[in-house]
Image (cartoon, grey):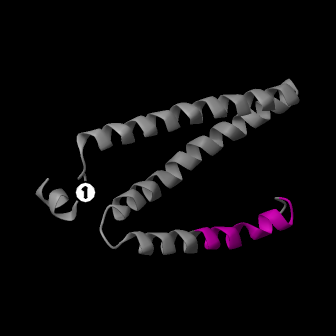
Amino acid sequence: MKIAEEVGVLSGTPGSRTRSLGLVGLGIVASGLLINVYLAIIARNLTAAEYAYFGAFWSLAQVAGFGMFLAVEQETARLLQTPGRPLGVLKAALVTAAAMAVASWPWWRWGGRC
């Protein structure tokens, strides 16, 4: 914990930590509600067969998304806690987003028929 105190990580008042946890909890609840609303809208507009296909896609996208991006999120959060790093992390995030956009361009250009 000595290193964390030297860098300033986890510094703040207990009230600010409680507020931050409350905001995170509120964000999680809102995300869950919005996902269920989204899935309800999709279910009302698709047939049962189409919704089964969408359900399989949705499950795969969630598992793959969590698996691929969890490490990136954790590393980004760790780096943002280090003083002087936020600009470097922002630059890396923008470069990564641009590279992903360029890499996915053929898929968008030809409608997924590469």
- The residue most toward the left is 2
Q: With 67 as the anchor, is 13 left or right in this view? A: left
How many labels sit on residues? 1
Residue type at mark 1 is Val
Along the line of sight, which residue is nearer the eye, 106 or 88? 88
Which residue range is magenta in the image?
97-111
Main structural element of the magenta stretch: helix, strand or loop? helix
Residue at image coords 16%, 57%? 5
- Tell whether position 109 is magenta: yes
Residue 76 visible in the current orientation = yes
Along the line of sight, which residue is nearer the eye, 47 or 88? 88
Residue at disc 1, secondary structure: loop
Residue 93, position as x, y percentages in the image = 52, 68
Q: Residues within 10 Å of mark 1 (few under 14, many from 20)?
A: some
Q: With 67 as the anchor, is 112 left or right in this view? A: right
Residue 79, position as x, y percentages in the image = 35, 64
Residue 3, position as x, y percentages in the image = 15, 61
Residue 46 visible in the current orientation = no
* Residue 104 falls in image quadrant: bottom right
Residue 37, position as x, y percentages in the image = 71, 29
Residue at image coords 71%, 35%? 56
* Residue 95 falls in image quadrant: bottom right
Along the line of sight, which residue is nearer the eye, 43 or 114? 43
* Residue 107 falls in image quadrant: bottom right
- Residue named by callout 1: 9
- Tell whether position 98 is magenta: yes
Q: With 12 as the anchor, is 87 left or right in this view? A: right
